[in-house]
Amino acid sequence: MTGEVELEDKVLVIRRIYVRLELRAAPEHREVAERVHGFFAASCPLYRSLQAAIAIKTELVLLPVELESERPR
């Protein structure tokens, strides 16, 4: 997550928040993940609380699923 702040009356104010959601999922689950990403914010208390005051953008990044043999021990 990153944010952008601006100076307002000598006070730093958060104006924009960028959230990068990384999800490990098999390619066949992409459609479901994208659909959920499209509506999850409406059910997120933090998003709903802040959206009127701060611009929030989210990005969904699907990562490949690691095979059990590829995981570090």
Image: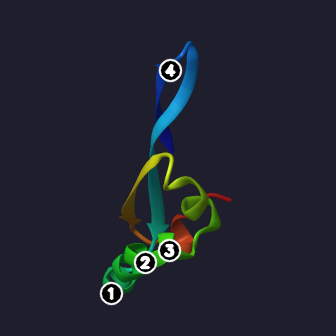
4 or 2: mark nearer the eye: 4
In the displayed structure, would residue 28 be above or below residue 53?
A: below
Real-space Cα separation, disc 4 to disc 2, in angstroms: 32 Å
Real-space Cα separation, disc 3 to disc 4, in angstroms: 29 Å
Real-space Cα separation, disc 1 to disc 4, in angstroms: 47 Å
**In front here: 53 or 19?**
53
3 or 4: mark nearer the eye: 4
Real-space Cα separation, disc 3 to disc 2, in angstroms: 6 Å
Q: Which residue is mark 2?
A: 39
Q: Amino acid at mark 4?
A: Glu
Task: Give me the residue at 60% from left, 59% from top.
Answer: 49
Tag 1–tag 3 contact (CB < 8 Å): no
Q: Which residue is mark 3?
A: 42
Q: Secondary structure at mark 3?
A: helix
Mark 3: give few (<14), some (14-19) or many (20+) Cα within 10 Å.
few
Q: Quadrant of residue 11?
A: top right
- Residue with the most extreme right position: 73
**In front here: 22 or 34?**
34
Q: Secondary structure at mark 4?
A: strand
Task: Give me the residue at 46% from left, 36% from top.
Answer: 15
Q: Which residue is mark 1?
A: 28
Mark 4: give few (<14), some (14-19) or many (20+) Cα within 10 Å.
few
Q: Which residue is mark 4?
A: 8
Tag 3–tag 2 contact (CB < 8 Å): yes
**In front here: 61 or 58?**
58
Q: Amino acid at mark 3?
A: Ala
Real-space Cα separation, disc 1 to disc 3, in angstroms: 25 Å
